[in-house]
Amino acid sequence: MAIETRPEKARGTGGGGRGGVRQRPWWMRPALHTAIVGAVLGYVIGHWLGNVLASSNATTEYPSIALSDSSDVPIVLGYLFGVVGWLAGLGVFNNLLRLIAGRPAPAEAEEEESSGLARYFRFTLDHKVVGIQYLVGMIVYFLTAGLFAMGIRAELLSPSYHLFSSSAYVEIVGEHGTMMMMLMTSVILGPFGNYFVPLMIGSKRVAFPRLEALSFWITPVAYLILLSGLMLGGFPFGWTGYAPLSIQSTYGADSYAIAFGLMGISVIMAGFNIIVTVICYRAPGMRWSRLPMFVWSMVATSFLMVLAAPVLVVGMYMMISDRTAQTAFFIDTLGGSSYLYQNVFWFFGHPEVYILALPGFGIVSEILPVFCRKPLFGYRVATAGMIGVTLLSFFVWQHHLFDSGINPDMRPVFMLTTELISIPTGFIYLVAMGTLWKAKIRLKVPMLFALGMYFNFLIGGISGVFLSDVPADTTEHGSFFVMAHFHYTIMGGLIFAFMGGCYYWLPKMMGIKLDEKLGKIHFWTMFIFFNSTFLPLFAVGMAGQPRRVFEYARSLETLNDWVSISAFCLGGSILIFVINFVWSTVIARVREEGNPWRSRGLEWQVSSPPPPGNFAQVPVVLSGPYEYGTPGAPPVADLSPPTGVVSAAYADTARAEA
Amino acid sequence: MAAEASAPAPAEAPDGRNHGLRIFIPWLVLSLAADLIIWFAWGPHMPPGAMSSSASNQQFDITVMAVMAAPVMLLVLFYFGYALIVWRQQEGDEEDGPPLHGNSRIQATWISVTSAIVLGLFVFGTVELVTASGAGAGEGASPIWTPGGKPLQVQVIGQQWRFTYRYPQFGGFETTDLVLPVGQWVEFHVTSIDVIHSFWAYQLGVKADANPGVDNVAYTKIDHSRSFTVRCAELCGLWHGAMFESGQAVSVADFRSWAASTQTRLAAVTQMLPPYALTYDPTVVPQMSKAMVAAGLTGGAGLYYPPTDPAQP
């Protein structure tokens, strides 16, 4: 595959390498196939080691391990060694010592980052390649997890007739919830954040390309490990994994803990890369006050990831050691506490739901001015909203424990913080309404999705206020009301914004046009069936149906059937997106040149798809990205600034900092 | 709330239409109508009904929330709808819109009004919490609010996949039937002997997590005698979906006679049980299951649920 691209690439080998470029045959070069070989080898080694540790011979030396469920240790070690093998097979660790020592990688390593299709199956350091990898990966993960949702709704067609056994049903519920919640954390930051943040801030590169690439290559292995749980009997505790149920469960729980922990590591690395890139790699003139809202949302999300995900990793680590080494972090009678897990999990879990919400706010705030032909109303308010949500989201987690028997004095505090967070969230609506005021609204597909996001998130947000009030929450807690609430904010908010981002930015990423007519059909079917699926669920929850049940009151059968049929139609509308995506990018391939939306965004000022290195020269940013209709507003950036301007700007900064 | 609507309303628009007023007046009418309907027509039928004190309180809170939420939702929806109809791009109009970057008066108004609403909700919620309204939610071992007098104590023991109930004031017998008196405060002590469950008596407005090793207290006073459903509201494993049972609220006299007769009937079984305690060590589980088998109930502690129930297809 990559062979035909080598000759053209071979000429540009400047210094750095040891002499000329040695060519290795394609099957020797690290790529997907070597990664798979590495993963399998790693798993076998880890499993063998675990068996040795837990075998009867070792009982005297490691009694606590031998006394644990005998297969947990081999499975955990198998997974961990498999991950290391996968990464080694991808070539993540190649030249690691050289790089640590500060010497450049040999030319051969850079050479192997060929162009062409092959680079998408490699550990490639180009942020635009990583963005596309993430995009395809996220769509695959989303479709897989969506299929599980179809399974849930199929079972709930009848209150008593069972399509699945009770164990299969909880497996499906757990896989759907966990896959959505752990992998969709990166659904916007992964594809669009990695791809567009450097373009939007006028940088030629990201700060940590290796961390960025690594953050992507962990996601497929986390996805596969989570799915492999099905072969081990699944896990019966949903996506929250409350102890002691998770400690008591069979081997499938190991796949949950390892996959979720891995995904935590992935988002930490992704977040670090975005934060440092935005702080250190902005072009001259790209002041914080000119930063596009999407970049602000990526920075806010990254801070949440970097600060919250370590807690998740620790929680998963404690769960694994409880399950294998017989520690007792979460066992009451042995000095642990099941509240510890709930607190650790939600200390991560609540910031996580804002990791899922903020990128959506960023995308819609980006789309709105372009299709209103007006500046963003209240730029500072929008920024304050993002920062406010970021800060407050760390102080609300105990509202998940309102009925759990925690110290009741804490409940007013967490009620207050939970209600306070609706103020910065409301800023997003103030900004939207101000931007729509006397606008010239063009209802293109991205704009439709942005408006759909505002509609859905309004319902999701307001239902959240119901949940913050303790007496009202007593009825709603743990019921389908909660489930409808967070599907409105995550699917109705995040996924609608993701779809809007796809229609808005795919012409930029791939240089092709997505079919407008199919796009409109996709939007309207998705919007109607989304609401028709989740709006009745508020009523179902209020009528007393708890979450994650497979039997329910017969009086709720009609509503549940309505919801299930709507959900299947919603699945169908997602298929329209997939068809449009494949049709437009693979078959029709209608070229999209230039700037179809007439956007002022810096990313639209370069060709589509952007050239390697993004910009021929570092641009000088002259004005904000939303100056639509502003008389005398300079162009957004000078893409070929006179010689010396950029170096002078950097020299100024250096002097100011000194 | 009125100030919120006036927010996007600067003086007379250049095209001669006062958009602010054209949004404000229909919004005001719609909001008033919606709130009246919610308060007077819908409120009395809001879940979870008015079977007990805590249920009525939750119904009241949900109604108050809905009354607050309706105008906010209507404002945003009506505004968006208005904008989409009135401010659409005209055919062939490629001009940009007016360059409005913000308006500090509107922004300040918005921030003050939303803050006032939120702080109002907080004060309302806190007052509710220190009164009996928050008593239906599990409050741990030391609740903020306690009823005077001597409430009826009922211990709820969660186990996979059944709730059982002990009545300490009647010799501590354990049964699978939940029978409660009308007109008397009931003090639930919710605990678990295996994993986390959540005791949810829907019509009573009581929800309290059953944590192993934790005594989680909730109160309610029942006003009407009828049956109510009990479900588990925290995923607790394979048969979580089948933790579905019903309880019965009866008059005080009926309750006393039921409790007395059950106490005598189960006296031998109660002897075999571990003594009543607020929480149980898992080591007593075999003892409990033995008693349950003696009482004619199948299995116990994990084996509780007969494998044929609920029936497989």
Image (spheres, rainbow, N blue to C red):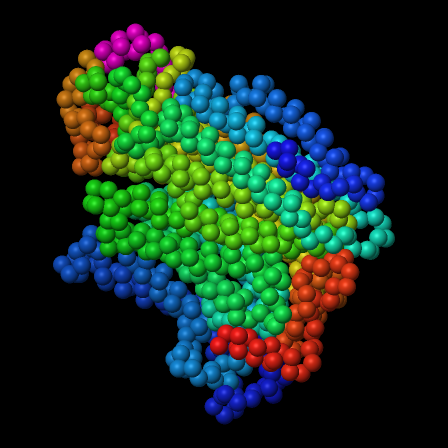
Residue nearest the observer in this picture, B10 or A240? B10
Where is residue A337 drawn, in percent x and y? 27, 44
- Name the residue at the right extreme: B92
Where is residue A632 drawn, in percent x and y? 77, 64
Residue nearest the observer in this picture, A164 or B138? B138
- Name the residue at the bottom extreme: A19
Please tell me whether residue B235 belongs to the stretch shown in magenta. Answer: no
Where is residue B175 drawn, in percent x and y? 26, 21
- Image check: B205 left or right of A130? left
Quarter of the rendering containing residue A126: bottom right
User: What residue is at 49 percent from the left and 23 percent from the top?
Assistant: B60
Residue nearest the observer in this picture, A215 or A584? A215
User: What residue is at 26 percent from the left and 35 percent from the top?
Assistant: B214
Number of labels in the image equals: 0
Magenta-tinted stretch: B244-262
User: What residue is at 34 percent from the left and 34 percent from the top?
Assistant: A408
Where is residue A628 drawn, in percent x and y? 74, 58
Please tell me whether residue B245 belongs to the stretch shown in magenta. Answer: yes
- Image check: A539 left or right of A395? right
User: What residue is at 21 percent from the left and 45 percent from the top?
Assistant: A335
Residue A574 visible in the snapshot: no
- Name the residue at the top extreme: B253
